[in-house]
Amino acid sequence: MSLALDRSPSHHGRSVRLDTLVRVRWLAIAGQTATIGVVGFIMNFPLPTGWCLALVALSAWVNLALRLRFPSSQRFSERATMVLLGYDVLQLAGLLFLTGGLQNPFSFLLIAPVMISATALPPPRTLMLGALVVVVATVLGWLHMPLPWYEGEQIGIPIAYTLGIWVALVSTLSFMGIFAFRVAEENRQLADALATAELVLAREQHLNALDGLAAAAAHQLGTPLATIALVAKELESEIQPGDGRAEDIRLLRTQADRCRDILRQLASMGVDPESPLERMELPQLLEEVSAPHRDFDVEIVLASAGDPGLEPVFARNPAILYGLGNIIENAVDFASERVEVTAAWNDETVSITVADDGPGFAVEIIERLGEPYVTTRPGAREEETDEPRPEVAERGGLGLGFFIAKTLLERTGAGLSLANRKLPDRGAVVTIVWPRAAVDHGGDRSGRKPAELGRAR
């Protein structure tokens, strides 16, 4: 047996398990068999029992074939589910044709497949199934075998009554279909919201765990870094002029000082953003976060695209300093020669774009970057190559740096987007965008902030 199955998730994110459809059909088979037995053998109504049982056996064969062909956990695509529900409509229509058409009180069971569709499939599929039911009901209203009744007696059903049954069937189908779809859609939206909340909570738990590790690291690394800085300073004072090792020792000391600055930042998360000493304009902020990365063979170019007189004023927020610093550091690590950091602003938004001329993001992983332990880093500038970087680091990089940077920036109200440069250029582009009101701590000459100015207007 061949059935159109979509092995990938539906673009609507909806699918029905085989086990669900099979169980519902077994229930229908049991009910149909019992009804045929009662009507044909207990009430002794004249009934084409052989044909009726053949249709029931056909449904049983379909169920067995599905069980043998697919695992019970198999999820059908929207189209396959609609085909199976359409079969159920036609099988029931066949039984109704043999037993009185719309005059049969069980004709309202034609609504059942549409209800299942309304709860599991998108509206276009349900409308198609509903249209099939309307067509079937219309045909059964005029074309059918006599309704089984006591032998020797004739039951007469007026045409107006049959028309009323058709109207009632179509009206009930429309009302219950819309109602079932709305209830199911609200449940789907609630489930999606809960799933999103769970993902956010999981990310927060990762970050909280890392906050504890950072505090422990700040405490444990203070003394050894101080020792390294002291030894490096003494070596630098003892080195002879012209010694080739002088530059390496100087770099060692500056990097040790940088590590100590990072540890100080971890301990300074409670700065007062309203203090004039803790505010800086955006160009000054970019200069501060890019300065530690200028000691390498990569040129960092800062640019601005906005009114020079209306630069946004940022608080000295360690979350923003660390997040931007990490993104610029990543760009420097992967760049071949140049990193461009561009700031832009207007009355509504503030954006910072960091672009490098390296290999760019791997297409297969760009959507997952920012999750814990997902990285494109093979090692810090170990080699220059035109080949794409591997997506999982085997020699260095856990993928936590960008995860922490992204989460910290998002906590300040930013949105991050990742892309590659358009050909023939190559390289990665990271864009950070804030609503201006979320980060601008400046004001006019009266000292009022932009939000206060907006309320004054």
Image (cartoon, helix red, strand yellow):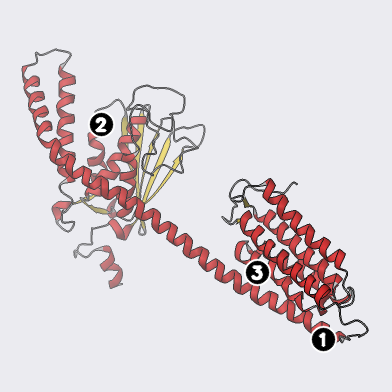
Measured as percent of width and height from the top left, residue 426 is found at: 46, 32
The residue where tag 3 is placed is 115
Tag 2 near tag 1, CB within 8 Å: no
Q: Is residue 122 left or right of residue 269?
A: right
Q: Please report whichever mark, 1 or 3, sits nearer to the chain's N-terminal start.
A: 3
Q: Nearer the viewer, residue 218 or 16?
A: 16
The residue where tag 1 is placed is 161
Asked where in the image residue 231 lies, by quadrant, the reply is top left
Q: CA distance from mark 2 to mark 3?
A: 65 Å
Q: Please report whichever mark, 2 or 1, sits nearer to the chain's N-terminal start.
A: 1
Measured as percent of width and height from the top left, residue 334 is found at: 37, 30
Describe the element under mark 1 as helix, strand or loop: helix
Describe the element under mark 3 as helix, strand or loop: helix
Total of numbered circles in the picture? Answer: 3
The residue where tag 2 is placed is 294
Q: Is residue 261 left or right of residue 370?
A: left
Measured as percent of width and height from the top left, residue 8 is found at: 60, 46
> How busy is the neighbourhood of tag 1: few (under 14 within 10 Å), some, or many (20 plus)?
few
Q: Does the rendering let one see residue 306?
A: no
Q: Does the rendering let one see residue 275?
A: yes
